[in-house]
Amino acid sequence: MDILFKLNMLDSIDSWFQKILPQRIYDGMPKALVSIASVIVILIVGFQIGNFAGKLVVKLLEKHNVDKTVHYFLSRCVTVFIKIMFFVMALSQIGFNISSFIAALGAAGVTAGLGLKDCISQFASGIQILFNKPFKSGDYVEVEGISGTIDAIHFMNTTMVTLENKIVTVPNSYFTTKSIINYTAQDTRRIDLVFPVRYGEDIPKAKGVLYRAARDNPNILDEPKPYVAVQEYAGSSINLVCQVWCRSNNYFPSFYTMQEDVKEAFDKNGIEIPFEQVDIHVKNEK
């Protein structure tokens, strides 16, 4: 930081060398060597400051409890911007016309923008995701049939981890132009289960067994209370719906243990889950 302070206070790197070097050594140095040394100093200092600023941004975001998916994105933006700024300063030390360079860079940017409009769109989508916050790191989401846990938001894409522990890279534009299902945005989530019983069963008894199985399951919340009702009269069974609530991050254990618990409870109470069947009636026309 002391070097940066001196760079800001002195008119040029050249005068800085003149101050820190003995006069006889400075007078004996070729001008080109001084310029090259100036460029090297600017680039080294600039890249160090850029990296330091990126780490500082991460620490500030962590201090203010900002979602970690934003950390990488913003720190990279700050780091790249500072490095580019010092690179332009380095060019000025070797005689580049910065104004012309910036104008040429702007023109090149317009041309590149036309050819890289998809990339620019992905970058803009990334910015939009950061500000709108449709999800945060660790959320389990689904977009266009792709589901997984949000891992990180990058410049052009977002990475997700599937239940099979596969890394899926999704373009950022998917999250701004498609419908997103965020399964873990809320603390609790409802599970809708359907259990068929045969037509000859005692329906109130079957409903009671279902209700008790839900209340005895440690993964199922007491509030809201489980709800059991007749859903429909199907071709081979009466289907009972059982709606229970669980913690969002405990959905799959709750779902699978309920399936097992209900089957055991039905067997214990003599309630039959029917096979799908077709009744064939043979008509004798004699």
Image (cartoon, grey):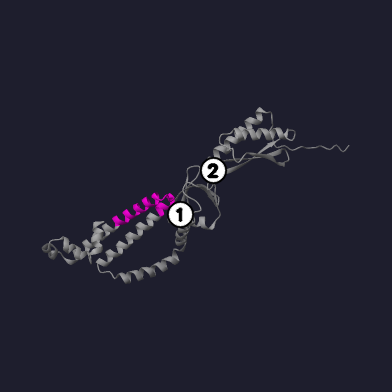
Q: Is residue 60 magenta?
A: yes
Could you say which disc has been placed on residue 248 in the image? 2
Going 18% across and 62% down the picture, which residue do you hit? 17
The x and y percentages for residue 6 are 23, 61
Q: Distance between the residues labelled 2 and 1?
A: 26 Å
Q: Say which label, 2 or 1, has the lower sequence index.
A: 1
Q: Which of 224 and 30 is in front in this view?
A: 224
Decide whether the magenta segment is chiefly helix, strand or loop. helix
Residues rendered magenta in the picture? 47-73
Most foreground residue, 171 or 50: 50
Is residue 78 shown left or right of residue 141? Answer: left
Query: In this view of the protein, can residue 40 be seen by the observer?
Result: no
Q: Where is residue 23 in the image (x, y as percent from the top left)?
A: 12, 64
Whole-percent x and y of residue 8?
26, 63
Inspect the image, locate mark 1, and give the three-letter code of the amino acid beneath it.
Asn
Tag 1 secondary structure: strand
* Residue holding disc 1: 157
Is the residue under label 1 in contact with that under label 2 (CB below 8 Å)? Answer: no
Q: Is residue 98 left or right of residue 13?
A: right
Q: Is mark 2 on a helix, strand or loop?
A: helix
Residue 85 shows in this picture: yes
Kindly report which numbered mark, 2 or 1, lies closer to the viewer in this rendering.
2
Query: For the point 18% across and 66% down, which residue is it?
Result: 31
Q: Quadrant of residue 216?
A: top right
